[in-house]
């Protein structure tokens, strides 16, 4: 019997919370369940920074604050010899970007101020800290000069907004409408930032003992990412050309002479050049980038050049994987790379020889199992601090210093051993499209048996140029705690498997991703892991695109939840915050130039086929895949009388799970929607009518 549609998501979830596997649990068992509130009990390590002498690691100890509903961070230290683990700064809100001075006697960090972030310096010997200056805007990317006397950072330089009329002065006490907002740039909003203030980002310097900031870059284009070449020269990243917004990935590395503020471009090729890091002897600059071939995705290579920009050498031409972050380690360079579902730290010699130093980096995505982590290298001795990722717990602090890497923390040892967490199983499946191997992971709920009774959630990652891996993810664990088998997949287009694999979706997304995903589902049905009548599908961003595409291609899923999708590439390309990238690199045409391909790749083109009950969810302040995208699919389904619901998340940007309460509500609403259409609940619902 069809479930009546009046049942609420919350009520449906209550019906099926434990009975997703039709098994009652007693109170003792329920106390071991990973419930929604457990999100507030978890902690994870982030941004570990090892001191220049390798003796101390400072890291951000992150947790979810119940009262402020925020992901907050305190600073803790670890003695790398004794393992002593101590708080350094706590209760200050969210601390970020802690960086050691060159001699290790001070720490520079960003902390919440009265109106915005402020730059602070802490003296390690006394524990005292001070604010460097009362800055008019929030600073970013702070870095020490080699001699420790100066700090460089980036900051917005405001400009007057354009205006075409002088506003009439309102009478005293009158309640008039707010003044008009006028824009004259293409990018008027950015996800997570909202409507952009008028102005340009520039680089500043300030004495390390505090004082007056000095602006060292100028003009109408943004400059950011400062790094010191020497005590009198800064490296900055930008694109100092007219109409720079039309080529959104283009950037060059510039050297700024701090004596006269003259600026010289050290790179000139067509393509992004970024993340410069200067060698310990100051003679070479390592950096990341690639030659722009106007493709939707290209692997990022590691380069090295002389300090004057000459002698550029590609060290990873034959490596086959993107490099995401770099640091010098003596005369070699350590690069962080996604490799087949894992993150590795690789040492590259100046001759290009590659040696794997550490595997299993990651664990900082928290909500979903994205490959995400960071590392730092000690100037003396070359010890490496990194975020260690695991399938069964969030990120810890790891240390690689000769011999096998060690994990130095156990932040959730007081909680996770006492809960019934899902076990993660890796599978590899041949795609029905071309027999290409597809990697996936399956979260098996507590008490799982391969008896063909369990419901399945296919959870699809976004990007689509991104990578899932065997990392702890609160959302996956929540689904499994309610009895779902959860499978998450790296279909074609995912990163970490080489440029050819990622490029399979160039001008063809969504496409054979569908075959990859269905092949994984078929394999779990064949293993008798799940009930073929109890299949559900969800995903966010690129995963939301694929969810909407899937329900236009098949009716095998009992229900679907498309989260923050692109539904119509034409509307997204024109006013999404990365629209210029979509037109130049993704589709390589404007909507009025090639209407056919925009329509062909849009899930809206398949909406006439949909019969699956489909929920749409989007943040009300999402400017990456704006609300109008989800609303188009919702409106079309309503016109076709297909069961649907639209969930708008107040105040939320694209990253819905950036607040713990939203992470909880997101997963619970998805499960509530699925429970409403779960055939196993149909009889219970009918009996209750």
Image (tube, rainbow, N blue to C red):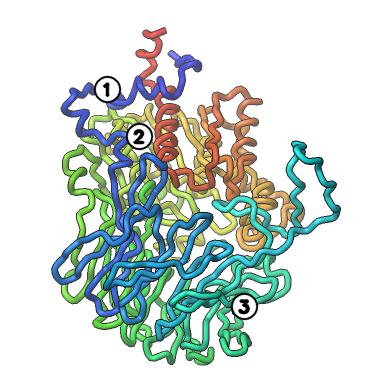
Q: Is residue 363 visible?
A: no
Q: What kind of element bears circle 1?
A: loop
| Label 1 – label 2 distance at C-alpha | 14 Å
The one nearer the camera, 297 or 102, is 102
Q: Position of residue 158 (x, y in %)?
A: 66, 64
Q: Mark 1 or mark 3, which is nearer to you?
A: 3
The quarter holding residue 481 reads top left
Residue sitting farthest toward the left: 82
N-terminal label among 2 and 3:
3
Density class for disc 2 (Cα within 10 Å; few <14, some 14-19, many ≥20) is: many
Q: How many marks?
A: 3
Q: Is residue 427 above or below residue 132?
A: above
Q: Is residue 395 visible?
A: yes
Q: Position of residue 305 (x, y in %)?
A: 48, 87
**In this figure, which residue is indicated by the disc labeled 1?**
22
Mark 2 touches mark 3? (CB < 8 Å): no
**Residue 87 located left or right of residue 577:** left
N-terminal label among 1 and 2:
1
Q: Is residue 63 above or below residue 328?
A: above
The one nearer the camera, 454 or 624, is 624
**Residue 161 located left or right of residue 680:** right
N-terminal label among 1 and 3:
1
Q: Is residue 11 above or below residue 459?
A: above
Q: Mark 1 or mark 2, which is nearer to you?
A: 1
Question: Where residue 217 is drawn, which disc sits there?
Answer: 3
Mark 1 touches mark 3? (CB < 8 Å): no
| Label 2 – label 3 distance at C-alpha | 54 Å
Q: Is residue 402 above or below residue 518?
A: below
| Label 1 – label 3 distance at C-alpha | 64 Å
Density class for disc 3 (Cα within 10 Å; few <14, some 14-19, many ≥20) is: many
**In this figure, which residue is indicated by the disc labeled 2?**
456
């Amino acid at each position: 019997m069809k479930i009546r549609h009046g049942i609420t998501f919350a009520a449906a979830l209550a019906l099926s919370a434990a009975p997703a596997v039709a098994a009652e649990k007693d109170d003792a068992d329920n106390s071991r369940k990973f419930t929604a509130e457990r999100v507030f009990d978890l902690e994870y390590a982030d941004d570990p920074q090892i001191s220049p002498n390798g003796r101390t690691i400072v890291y951000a100890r992150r947790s979810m604050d119940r009262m402020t509903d925020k992901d907050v961070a305190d600073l803790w230290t670890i003695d790398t010899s004794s393992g002593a683990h101590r708080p350094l700064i706590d209760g200050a809100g969210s601390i970020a970007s802690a960086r050691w001075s060159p001699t290790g006697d001070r720490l520079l960090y960003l902390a919440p101020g009265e109106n915005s972030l402020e730059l602070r310096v802490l003296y390690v010997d006394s524990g005292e800290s001070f604010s460097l200056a009362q800055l008019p805007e929030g600073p970013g990317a702070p870095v020490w000069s080699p001699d420790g006397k100066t700090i460089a950072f980036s900051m917005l330089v405001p400009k007057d907004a354009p205006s075409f009329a002088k506003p009439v002065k309102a009478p005293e006490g009158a309640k008039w409408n707010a003044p008009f907002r006028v824009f004259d740039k293409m990018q008027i909003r950015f996800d997570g930032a909202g409507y952009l203030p008028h102005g340009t980002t520039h680089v500043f310097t300030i004495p390390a003992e505090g004082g007056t900031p000095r602006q060292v870059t100028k003009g109408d284009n943004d400059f950011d990412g400062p790094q010191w070449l020497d005590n009198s020269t800064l490296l900055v990243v930008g694109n100092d050309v007219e109409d720079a917004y039309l080529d959104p990935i283009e950037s060059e590395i510039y050297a700024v002479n701090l004596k006269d503020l003259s600026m010289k471009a050290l790179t000139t090729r067509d393509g992004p050049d970024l993340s410069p890091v200067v060698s310990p002897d100051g003679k070479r600059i390592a950096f990341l980038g690639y030659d722009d071939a106007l493709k939707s995705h290209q692997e990022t290579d590691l380069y090295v050049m002389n300090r004057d920009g000459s002698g550029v050498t590609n060290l990873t031409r034959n490596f086959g994987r993107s490099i995401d972050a770099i640091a010098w380690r003596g005369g070699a360079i350590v690069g962080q790379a996604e490799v087949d579902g894992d993150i590795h730290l690789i040492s590259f010699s100046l001759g290009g020889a590659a040696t794997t130093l550490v595997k299993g980096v990651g664990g900082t995505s928290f909500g979903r199992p994205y490959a995400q982590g960071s590392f730092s290298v000690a100037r003396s001795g070359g010890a490496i601090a990194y975020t260690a990722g695991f399938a069964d717990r969030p990120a810890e602090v790891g240390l690689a210093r000769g011999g096998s890497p060690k994990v130095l923390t156990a932040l959730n040892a007081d909680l996770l051993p006492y809960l019934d967490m899902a076990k993660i199983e890796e599978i590899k499946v041949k795609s029905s499209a071309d027999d290409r191997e597809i990697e996936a992971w399956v979260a098996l709920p507590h008490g799982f048996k391969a008896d063909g009774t369990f419901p399945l959630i296919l959870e699809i990652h976004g990007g689509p140029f991104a990578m899932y891996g065997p990392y702890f993810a609160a959302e996956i664990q929540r689904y499994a705690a309610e009895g779902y088998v959860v499978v998450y997949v790296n279909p074609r287009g995912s990163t970490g498997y080489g440029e050819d694999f990622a490029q399979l979706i160039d001008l063809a997304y969504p496409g054979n991703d569908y075959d990859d995903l269905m092949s994984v589902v078929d394999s779990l049905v064949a293993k008798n892991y799940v009930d073929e009548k109890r299949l559900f599908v969800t995903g966010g961003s690129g995963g939301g695109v694929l969810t909407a595409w899937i329900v236009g291609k098949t009716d095998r899923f009992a229900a679907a939840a498309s989260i923050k999708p692109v539904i119509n590439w034409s509307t997204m390309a024109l006013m999404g915050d990365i629209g210029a990238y979509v037109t130049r690199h993704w589709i390589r045409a404007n909507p009025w130039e090639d209407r056919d391909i925009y329509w062909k790749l849009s899930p809206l083109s398949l909406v006439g086929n949909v019969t699956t009950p489909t929920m749409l969810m989007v943040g009300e302040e999402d400017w990456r895949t704006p609300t109008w995208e989800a609303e188009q699919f919702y409106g079309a389904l309503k016109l076709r009388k297909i069961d649907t619901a639209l969930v708008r998340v107040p105040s939320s940007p694209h990253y819905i799970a950036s607040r713990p309460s939203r992470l909880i509500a997101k997963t619970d609403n998805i499960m509530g929607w699925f429970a409403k259409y779960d055939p196993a609940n149909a009889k219970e619902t009918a009996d209750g009518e």
